[in-house]
Image (tube, rainbow, N blue to C red):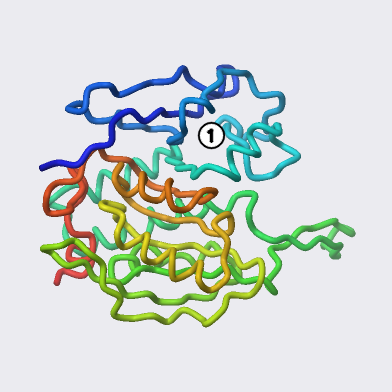
Amino acid sequence: MACRVSNINYLRAYPPSTPRFSPKCHHQNPNSPPPLLNNYFFPLPPSTLQPHLPKKMMSCSSALRRSFVTVKSHMATTEETSISEDRMLVFVPPHPLIKHWVSVLRNEQTPSPIFRNAMAELGRLLMYEASRDWLPMVTGEIQSPMGVASVEFIDPREPVAVIPILRAGLALAEHASSILPATKTYHLGISRDEETLQPTIYLNKLPDTFPEGSRVFVVDPMLATGGTIVASLQLIKERGVENQQIKVISAVAAPPALQKLSEKFPGLHVYTGIIDPTVNDKGFIVPGLGDAGDRSFAT
């Protein structure tokens, strides 16, 4: 029997010319799936859905592409900052390349090498979006061929921890080091029982404690029932990482997993290629893209 989440309110991001918050939308019919969203998606309670115009938007050209500001407090209103800290947010960046690679992954005729490459490219784009306004910076001056220039670099003394959930997470995290100047990779292996759908940890290479203030990418391609990602995040939180310092990267997400994450990890940010409406009785996302690990590695 398919699993669906009804009566959830959604917020979307639009270009700066329109109000940021859409009117609230209730899915009263439990037999109707929630909408497929191509912009940012935020499951929030009705009390937070107060339509208003933002007081200040990003002044750079990326505002047209991403037009939502919550991470830096000086770029957001008090209400927006509170929402960001107290509610889990899910981002579906409306980039055409993200849509392209998701489409390649969905095609059942895509051969394994191309599927794995598509997963890696999708991961690169999602991590690029997720790292915006999030990485530690250092400033200074350097000598260019034409004169002295003020510069900003990613601080290499604070590497971002990348945690792929084996085995499919390896493909989605493959290009992490190509976009992040300093990373540390910790592997976490979790399998799911095909009958009970419960997770079992078979490999744990996490440190005993993460350094204070660590930023962590958790890379899990399929957020379906939510068992695997919840187990992963609980292990990470036990090692001293706050919800606000964790960003989940996934190829496809579904409402059951997002509902669990929203209830258990307020302040968490999830970046996904697309949100599909249902999960079937075998724990697979529909329409989804099949078994991401099997298709990535042809085994």
Q: Quadrant of the image for the N terminus?
A: top left
Vertical side of 129 occupied by 45: above or below: above
The front one of 254 and 129 is 254
* Disc 1 target residue: 65
Q: Position of residue 287 (x, y in %)?
A: 18, 42
Does residue 70 show up? yes
Residue drawn at x 29%, y 55% as measured from the top left:
222
- On screen, residue 108 versus residue 34, left or right, reads left
The quadrant holding residue 279 is: top left
Q: Position of residue 136 (x, y in %)?
A: 69, 61
The front one of 181 and 158 is 158
Q: Position of residue 273 (x, y in %)?
A: 36, 45
Q: Quadrant of the image for the C terminus?
A: bottom left
Residue drawn at x 82%, y 62% as measured from the top left:
144
- On screen, residue 281 versus residue 12, left or right, reads left
- On screen, residue 17 versus residue 7, left or right, reads right
Going by the numbered disc 1, the residue's amino acid type is Arg
Does residue 129 show up? no
Residue drawn at x 40%, y 50% as measured from the top left:
261
- The secondary element bearing badge 1 is classed as helix
The quadrant holding residue 286 is: top left
Q: Position of residue 164 (x, y in %)?
A: 39, 68
